[in-house]
Image (cartoon, rainbow, N blue to C red):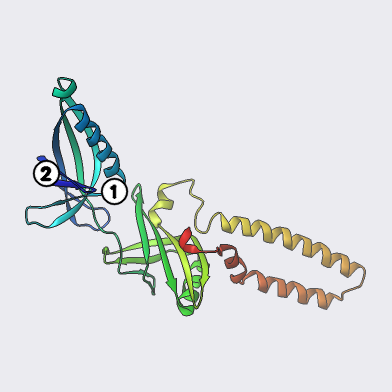
Amino acid sequence: MDLRIGDRGIPTDIEERTNFVSRHTGRTCVRLHVLVSVSGKGEHDRMLDLVQNARHNNVSAADEAGRTRMWKVRNHSYSYQNSGDSAVYNHRFELEEDEELMPTSLHIDELVLRPHKYEEEFDREALIISAWTSTNEADSQRLKDLVARRDFYPVVRVGISEEIREMRFGAVLWSEDGASTKHRITLVERIYDEQHDSSPGVGEPEASNVERSLATGLGMIDGLLETLGAKEILTPEEIAGIRLKAEEEIQIFDKRWAFRRVEDADKW
């Protein structure tokens, strides 16, 4: 099998081939242990440069059926015999079949999003999703309503896996983009909070910061109203009306939503 790293093809010998089940898709994927032998210190140094490149860029190779697959370099080691120009360096690689993790759509409860950029990873057993989307006004409002409820929702990554996962929102940032709104969305699987006893929970740290700000503001308002009432500048009825209006305003999520606005959500 010939590996291709950048523009260079490298003949390899397959020493071991095993299968594993992908945590992301549930597919059966391939894991390979391969050997690359080169002669001389110069070729060895060039191989080390290629290894560094391969750690940041996936490598490709055609399988037995002639289909090109992408691979991730999981481990690399080398040993050598003799020294100088006559030395033979044996490089061993552990390769895992790479998967294209880009959903055709992302379903959050009844909201359907189509990300233009997407990443996902696991923290222990918990799936963490980062998705960048552009939505119309109606879907932007639906998304805002879901975030405001601070709940867990069924999430399906169509095109990656049909498995339903219970997830909450982490950080959600947004920016205006003409008639559309860009969003940078983080979703966290429920098991994350169960496995992290010190997890700050849904909507943190924003929720605690907002609560502290509201408490401070309400304390100031109470003090001001008491002073105005004592000086008979406001009647008891007027003070009661102001308090009622303040309680209504606290429930408006739009005021907190504004704190999540950035210049360009795609850059976060």
Asked if residue 146 can be seen in this view, the reply is no
Q: Which residue is mark 1?
A: 57
Name which residue lies at 52% across and 59% down. 203
| Direction from residue 147 to residue 10 in the image, left or right | left
Q: Nearer the viewer's eye, disc 2 or disc 1? A: 1
Amino acid of disc 1:
Asn
Q: Quadrant of residue 115?
A: bottom left
Q: Dot 2 corresponds to which residue?
A: 17
Residue 259 showing in the rendered view: yes
Q: Secondary structure at mark 1?
A: loop
Q: Residue furthest left?
A: 64
CA gap, disc 2 and disc 1: 22 Å
Residue located 40% across and 57% down the image: 190
Q: Is residue 228 above or below residue 2?
A: below
Q: Is residue 98 above or below residue 149?
A: above
Q: Nearer the viewer, residue 151 or 266?
A: 266
> Residue 67, position in %: x, y?
12, 58
> Type of residue at label 2?
Arg
